[in-house]
Image: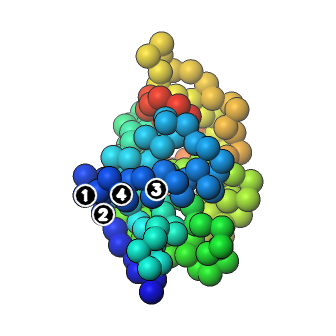
Amino acid sequence: MTGFRTAHTADLNAETRLALRRLLDAAFGPVSDDTYENTLGGSHAMIFDDGDLIGHASVVPRRVLHRGKALRAGYIEGVAVREDQRRRGHGATLMTEAERLVRAAFDLGALGASEVGSRMYAARGWHRWQGPLSALTPDGIRPTPEVAGYIYVLPASVPLDLAGELTCDWRDGALW
């Protein structure tokens, strides 16, 4: 029997965290500790089948700078569906919940998309960022042109200038 659950990271037991790590490793190849850690600290949308985690997406709070303001961003991380469960609408179920959380609690949603994933996000109303991207690092603001074309945003409560600059906060591993 398939079931859906949302929970904050604080409410995930060790077994569920291990299942999440295994799902991410299976979906993306072995993920780094930083990549796994970047999925934690927020809300998780999860799909279980007979107790096994088969789908996941998290919304992690971050700060981004845009038009001179620090905005609350719900950053989408760890969107994965077990290979044998794909093409059954699980990704849409996970993203519907993630988008609900973004619209209810954040100024905007943001995510880094693969080429394959970008089609799904664009079809769901996410917009590819057109302007310059950068990160606020311990050494100051650093341009991140290597992610141009892969960052998508979902406007929520603040108007966005998609051609303007967007700067993300610092974190270990992939900045975006």
Whole-number angstrom distance, CA of label 2 to CA of label 3 = 13 Å
Whole-number angstrom distance, CA of label 1 to CA of label 2 = 6 Å
Whole-number angstrom distance, CA of label 4 to CA of label 1 = 11 Å
Whole-number angstrom distance, CA of label 3 to CA of label 4 = 9 Å
Q: Which mark is residue 78?
A: none
Q: What residue is drawn where x is 58% and y is 50%?
A: 25
| Disc 1 residue crowd, few under 14, some 14–19, many 20+, Cα 10 Å | few
Q: Which residue is mark 4?
A: 15
**Nearer to the camera, 153 or 43:** 43
Q: Which mark is residue 11?
A: 1
Residue ranking furthest to the bottom: 1
Residue type of the residue flagged with mark 2: Ala
In the rendered view, does 101 fall on the left or right side of 23? left
**Occupied quadrant, residue 165:** top right
| Disc 2 residue crowd, few under 14, some 14–19, many 20+, Cα 10 Å | few
Mark 3 or mark 4: whose residue is earlier in sequence: 4
Mark 2 or mark 3: whose residue is earlier in sequence: 2
Question: Which is more foreground, mark 2 or mark 3?
Answer: 3
Residue type of the residue flagged with mark 4: Glu
Question: Which is more foreground, mark 4 or mark 2?
Answer: 4
Question: Which is more foreground, mark 4 or mark 1?
Answer: 4
Residue type of the residue flagged with mark 1: Asp
| Disc 3 residue crowd, few under 14, some 14–19, many 20+, Cα 10 Å | many
In the rendered image, the vertical position of residue 89 relative to residue 9, given as above or below: below
Question: Which is more foreground, mark 3 or mark 4?
Answer: 4
Label 4 residue SS: helix
**Occupied quadrant, residue 148:** top right
Q: Which mark is residue 20?
A: 3
| Marks 1 & 2, CB-CB < 8 Å contact | yes
Q: Position of residue 40 (x, y in %)?
A: 38, 47
Q: Quadrant of the C terminus?
A: top right
